[in-house]
């Protein structure tokens, strides 16, 4: 066995590989970009080498820099992780040419499976079932359209060199084909430098089933059962599980046998995944599962396979690269219980799932399950790399128990101020369709509105009432609210009529806000919520609690519904837009002045007809910040 390994990658996969290396007494070597100088994988390595600027194309994707780092540190082996150079045959050849052990698929296998059309032809020859479609050399648009017409719509146009959901278009009708083809080809050329495509029959109730395979240099290939990766958003996996729900013994035997045949057809060595598409309209059936592609590397979702088999796939990779045989015979590989993995992304579901970057001022993940992560509290989520910040993995005796435990784990996630998809994951895992196993690759698209809906209304009542007490507004023994001393004394501003000051809490969460006063919710015992510097966490969501003085019924409002600044200050929140229906007392604008926040709220039920300020604006006293019309 080699004594040192360099991981040509970053983040959670680098940390994952280091964990096994250290357990086996192998020296762990990291490479890093300037943006990753303080990253977790650098901290956990025994040695680390800077290889370039933040952009991956100038660091992690530069083979010569990675090789130079390996030579400089005396690394005996290189593990590519996934992504970056992991499926680059030329890099694999360069590693081996330099006398360094390559912990990955043979270059010939990478090439054989790298182009989807060639891979499918190879699979047909090996007796592996493939999806009906066209994989010909003739790329004339008219020929491609005629083939699509013959297959029957809907069809899927896929880039031959594609991956990650890029260069892929679903086409519903013959009339729409040529425009979709042109768009697909442009994206393929831009992403992969190759605009060739293939055409496949689009499966209306598709399930994404994949089989983990493993081969050694003696020609032995085994499988480690299947995973279901059907819960996807825009072709990106969100939640994975093993085994696949609804998979009977006969269907499992058929799909795993096909996977082993596929791996043997390319003389595969190491860890790889054979991906299948299943027509689940009538449940999983052996005659309705077809080869889609092969990933010639370790997969992001490999932990669920490790959980049900008890196998460390990275250790197996090390041993195969060192020339050792597959550690277990097929009959000796167990399948126990049920495992699920959720991908925690730094993204904002309420804002179109846009990535969220910045410093992780507060970062806490569950400590009673397996967590694979590459970040830490105080670290940064960079704009330069994939926004996945952790994988949460559970293993239970049943699918129901696994789903419930993973939902609880996602609900415990606390991240601030970077936004995450934790609450979205909770809703996916608790959705009745998911719980029943009624999922396909279109599940999230069909249910997305409900899955991203804010939970603020639920939290707002309980959390704001608790927040009132946390901020000093408490109930006495007679169930009367005792005022917060800060607000005692002279009453507030008078603007176009008398006003009365009230203490108010606003709970800001996702795209909405809820305002609470002592009168709005009676004192009671509420379940405790975790707090961090004025931020409350519940069910995977983060809520910022703001205490401020509310100016009368309208918060600085005139009788005509105009909300005016009671004093010069800075706008720190605008929670409504023109056309929004608002309720009396609902916060519209929050002004910061004299180190205090002042909410301007709707004076009556109505509709916002004007907004004259934006977050960050400095405004003068009496400036009209918004207007509400009654109705």
Image: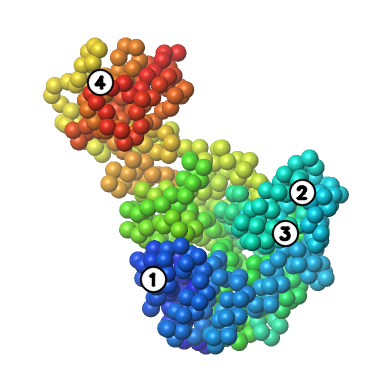
> How far is the residue under mark 1 from the one under mark 3?
39 Å
> Is 580 above or below relative to 58?
above
> How far is the residue under mark 3 from the one under mark 4?
63 Å
Check contact, mark 1 vs mark 4: CB within 8 A. Answer: no
Category of crowding for the residue at label 2, using alpha-carbon neighbours closer than 10 angstroms: few (below 14), some (14–19), many (at least 20): many
Category of crowding for the residue at label 1, using alpha-carbon neighbours closer than 10 angstroms: few (below 14), some (14–19), many (at least 20): many
Kindly identify the residue that appears in the image at 58 percent across and 76 percent down.
Answer: 91
Q: Element at badge 1?
A: helix
Q: Quadrant of the C terminus?
A: top left
Q: Quadrant of residue 500?
A: top left
How was this image coloured? Answer: rainbow
**Could you say which is closer to the camera, residue 369 or residue 67?**
67
Check contact, mark 2 vs mark 1: CB within 8 A. Answer: no
Q: Which residue is mark 2?
A: 155
Q: Element at badge 3?
A: loop
Check contact, mark 1 vs mark 3: CB within 8 A. Answer: no
Earlier along the polypeptide chain: callout 1 or callout 3? 1
Q: Which mark is residue 42?
A: 1
Q: Quadrant of residue 574?
A: top left
Q: Let me know if residue 444 appears in the view.
A: yes
The mark lying in front, picked from 3 and 4, is 3
Earlier along the polypeptide chain: callout 2 or callout 3? 2
Q: Which residue is mark 4?
A: 622
Q: Which mark is residue 196?
A: 3
> How far is the residue under mark 1 from the one under mark 4?
54 Å
């Amino acid at each position: 066995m080699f004594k040192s390994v360099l991981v040509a990658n970053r983040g959670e996969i680098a940390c994952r590989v280091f964990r096994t290396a250290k357990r086996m007494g192998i020296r762990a070597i990291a490479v890093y970009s300037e943006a990753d100088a303080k990253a977790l994988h650098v901290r956990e390595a025994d040695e680390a080498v800077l290889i370039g600027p933040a952009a991956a194309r100038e660091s992690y994707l530069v083979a010569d820099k990675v090789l130079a780092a390996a030579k400089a540190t005396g690394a005996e082996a290189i593990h590519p992780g996934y992504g970056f150079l992991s499926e680059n045959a030329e890099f694999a050849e360069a590693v081996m040419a330099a006398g360094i052990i390559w912990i990955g698929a043979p270059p010939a296998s990478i090439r054989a499976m790298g182009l989807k059309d060639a891979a499918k032809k190879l699979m047909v020859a090996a007796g592996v079932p493939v999806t009906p479609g066209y994989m010909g050399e003739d790329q004339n648009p008219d020929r491609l359209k005629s083939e699509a017409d013959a297959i029957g719509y809907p069809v899927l146009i896929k880039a031959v060199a594609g991956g990650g959901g890029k260069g892929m278009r679903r086409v519903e009708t013959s009339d729409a084909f040529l425009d979709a083809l042109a768009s697909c080809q442009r994206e393929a050329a831009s992403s992969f430098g190759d605009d060739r495509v293939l055409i496949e029959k689009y499966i209306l109730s598709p399930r994404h089933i994949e089989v983990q395979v493993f081969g050694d240099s003696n020609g032995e290939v085994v499988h480690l059962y299947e995973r279901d990766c059907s819960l996807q958003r825009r072709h990106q996996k969100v939640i994975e599980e093993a085994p696949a729900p609804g998979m009977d013994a006969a269907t499992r035997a058929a799909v795993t046998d096909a996977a082993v045949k596929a791996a043997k057809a390319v003389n595969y060595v190491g860890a790889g995944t054979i991906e299948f598409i299943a027509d689940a309209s009538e449940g999983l059936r052996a005659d309705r599962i077809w080869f889609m592609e092969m990933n010639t590397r370790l997969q992001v979702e490999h932990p669920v396979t490790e959980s049900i088999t008890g196998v460390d796939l990275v250790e197996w990779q090390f041993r195969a690269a060192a020339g050792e045989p597959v550690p277990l015979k097929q009959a000796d590989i167990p399948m126990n219980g049920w495992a699920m993995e959720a991908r925690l992304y730094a993204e904002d579901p309420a804002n179109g799932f846009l990535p969220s970057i910045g410093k992780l001022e507060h970062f806490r993940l569950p400590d009673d399950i397996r967590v694979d992560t590459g970040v830490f509290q105080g670290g940064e989520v960079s704009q330069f790399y994939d926004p996945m910040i952790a994988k949460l993995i559970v293993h239970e005796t049943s699918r129901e128990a696994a789903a419930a435990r993973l939902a609880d784990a996602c609900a415990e996630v606390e991240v601030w101020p970077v936004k995450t998809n934790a609450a979205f994951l909770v809703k996916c895992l608790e959705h009745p369709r998911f719980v029943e196993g009624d999922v396909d690759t279109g599940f999230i698209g069909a249910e997305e509105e409900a899955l991203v809906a804010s939970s603020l209304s639920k939290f707002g009542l309980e959390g704001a009432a608790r927040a009132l007490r946390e901020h000093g507004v408490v109930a006495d023994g007679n169930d009367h609210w005792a005022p917060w001393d800060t607000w005692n004394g002279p009453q507030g501003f008078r603007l176009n009529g008398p006003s009365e000051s009230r203490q108010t809490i606003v709970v800001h969460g996702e795209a909405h806000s809820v305002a609470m006063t002592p009168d709005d919710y009676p004192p009671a015992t509420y379940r405790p919520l975790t707090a961090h510097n004025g931020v409350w966490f519940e069910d995977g969501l983060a809520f910022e609690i703001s205490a401020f003085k509310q100016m009368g019924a309208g918060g600085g409002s005139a009788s005509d519904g105009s909300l005016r600044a009671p004093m010069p200050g800075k706008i720190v929140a605008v929670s409504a837009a023109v056309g929004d229906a608002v309720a009396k007392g609902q916060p519209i604008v929050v002004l910061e002045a004299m180190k205090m926040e002042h909410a301007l709220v709707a004076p009556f039920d109505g509709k916002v007809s004007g907004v004259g300020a934006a977050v960050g604006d400095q405004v003068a006293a009496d400036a009209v910040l918004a207007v509400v019309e009654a109705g």
